[in-house]
Amino acid sequence: MNAITKLFLFLLVVAPLASAQDFATAFAEGVISTGHEFGITFSPDGKEAYFSRREQGAKATHVFRSDFRDGKWQTAKPVEFSGETWSDLDPFVSPDGKRIFFISTRTVPGAAADAKPNMDIWYTERIGQTWGEPKHVASVNSDFKEGTPVITRDGTMYFFSDREAPGKINNIYVSKYVNGEYQSPSKLSAAINSGASDTSPFISPDGKTLLFYSQRSGGEGQADLYVSFWRKRNWQTPINLGKKVNTASFEYNPVPSRDGKTLYFGRDRSLQQIDLSAVGVKSLKPKLFTR
């Protein structure tokens, strides 16, 4: 056996194989990723990051903001509309940067003082460098859990809810924005909603590329990231993002950067990042998230 053959056998049998951890890295480790975060979104210029964080020992989750200045991400602080008596999470900055959509357990307008807290969709509008009073989006909410509201350029909203199987199965829904009002939501097709839990959508600005995570069979682990494309007036069979992203663990909340070049997602209570070109899905290109 010659030296080249021996080296080949060593690499094949002994040397460790590359895993998803070798490709994805923690985003702004120690500043944004501290082991207590999930669900990130960016301002249109990419210089403001908003994300969910539940700090050690805290009873509630809050939306935090970090600004990119002097070549680095700054210490994150809770946003203006967060409070200590409820949870706010799953922020999404609209494509035009004028609104943040999020979910909250805060008291719904008109609810009884002793009403049970529920995860509902809210939004707040930009006022200079700050954010205004949150508004409840009553037409899309139910008596059950809603989560991860995301918006296309024309205002169409995608989100998930467990309203059909409370506490067990999430499905992804869509609500059209007509004359300044969100319409009654409809459930996406069986191509997206598999019967397992399908959760935390991200929709491209043009509404034609959908990222989400799913616990459907055939994945790499407990939950995997998928992408589906809108073609011929239907959502196509979702494509698993593969082993450079998905592991035996739980991957969740996929979000591309504003320039489409980086994919952010959650794993093990940390925000991960990977170059979109490294994912290995040929049809998944930066321009999908910028046009």
Image (cartoon, grey):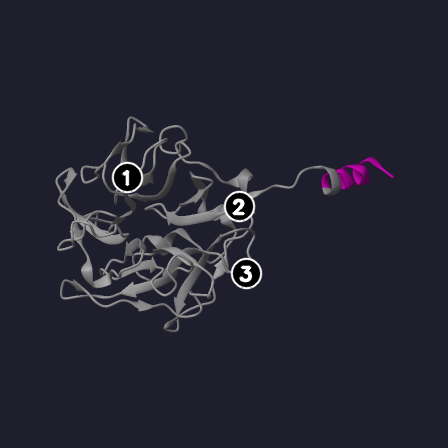
Residue 213: percent from the left, percent from the top?
A: 44, 54
Spatial separation of the CA atoms under disc 2 and disc 1: 24 Å
- As drawn, the residue found furthest toward the top would be 70
Q: In terms of depth relative to the viewer, which is nearer, 9 or 139?
A: 139
Mark positioned earlier in the residue sequence (2 or 3): 3
The reply to whether residue 273 is in sight is yes
Spatial separation of the CA atoms under disc 3 and disc 1: 32 Å
Q: Which mark is residue 62?
A: 1
Horizontal side, residue 152 vs residue 20: left or right = left
Region rendered in magenta: 1-11
Question: Which residue shows up at 18% across the image and 37% down it?
Answer: 80
Mark positioned earlier in the residue sequence (3 or 1): 1
Which amino acid, by three-letter code, is at mark 1? His
Which amino acid, by three-letter code, is at mark 3? Ser
Q: In terms of depth relative to the viewer, which is nearer, 92 or 145?
A: 145
Query: What quarter of the picture does the C terminus occupy?
Result: bottom left
Q: Which mark is residue 249?
A: 2
Residue 17: percent from the left, percent from the top?
A: 65, 41
Spatial separation of the CA atoms under disc 2 and disc 3: 14 Å
Callout 1 secondary element: strand
Q: Which mark is residue 217?
A: 3
